[in-house]
Amino acid sequence: MIARGKMKPDTISFNAVSASGKSSRWKNVVSLYREMICRNLESNSITFSSTISSYEKDHKWEEALQLVGFMVRSKVEVNTITLNAAISSCEKAGKWQVALQLFSVMVRGETKVDGITFSAAVSACREGGAWNKALQLFNAMRLYGLETSTTTFNATISACEKD
């Protein structure tokens, strides 16, 4: 994947290529991650977040959660971006209950929730037809001092329409 020239590929170069990829090239990101492993390069939260986001595109929520677990076991920082990507991965696969479990882990733990976290969780509820949970999450955003975005409004309205 990475050109073989005078420059030796490292974690930073793999992350740069992965992060700059378009969503239609998600398989390339997964291939890059596998190449990093083969080269014994150390992965970091950027590597994992990019890979988890890539799994989202193909509804591979289990693989996304396995990577989160691997991060925890490897003592790699699991941050808001990583868990937002995992929640979105669950949402895209229709696993709204799992998405809400991840959301709960974030709320109870030390990982900061943000507007993207809430939007992803509300969207997961929409996909699962859980309009009441979507509405609860929407209202809870204010408790966290977060602004509601158009995306969150639309997802909440859509969830309520599905009932």
Image (cartoon, rainbow, N blue to C red):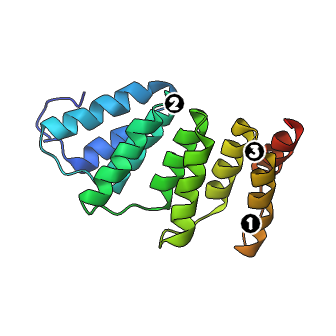
Q: Earlier in the sequence, mark 2 or mark 1?
A: 2
Of badges 3 and 1, the one in the foreground is 3
Read off the residue under disc 3. Answer: 130
Indicate the position of residue 94 as horizontal and vertical percent values: 61, 34
Read off the residue under disc 1. Answer: 141
Residue at coordinates 72% horizontally, 68% vertically from top-left? 146
Total residue callouts: 3
Q: Is residue 38 above or below residue 108?
A: above
Indicate the position of residue 150 as horizontal and vertical percent values: 80, 50
Describe the element under mark 3 as helix, strand or loop: loop
Read off the residue under disc 2. Answer: 57
Indicate the position of residue 93 as horizontal and vertical percent values: 56, 32
Q: Is residue 59 above or below residue 128?
A: above
Image quadrant holding the C terminus, namely: top right
Q: Earlier in the sequence, mark 3 or mark 1?
A: 3
Query: Is residue 151 toward the left or the right of residue 86 in the image?
Result: right
The answer to whether residue 24 of the structure is visible from this angle is: yes
Q: Nearer the viewer, residue 49 or 4?
A: 49
Q: Amino acid at mark 2?
A: Lys
Describe the element under mark 1 as helix, strand or loop: helix
- Asked if the residues shown at circle 3 and circle 2 are in contact, with their CB atoms under 8 angstroms apart, the answer is no
CA–CA distance in space, label 3 to label 2: 23 Å
Image quadrant holding the N terminus, namely: top left
Residue at coordinates 19% horizontally, 46% vertically from top-left? 10
- Asked if the residues shown at circle 3 and circle 1 are in contact, with their CB atoms under 8 angstroms apart, the answer is no
Q: Earlier in the sequence, mark 3 or mark 2?
A: 2
Query: Is residue 50 toward the left or the right of residue 153 in the image?
Result: left
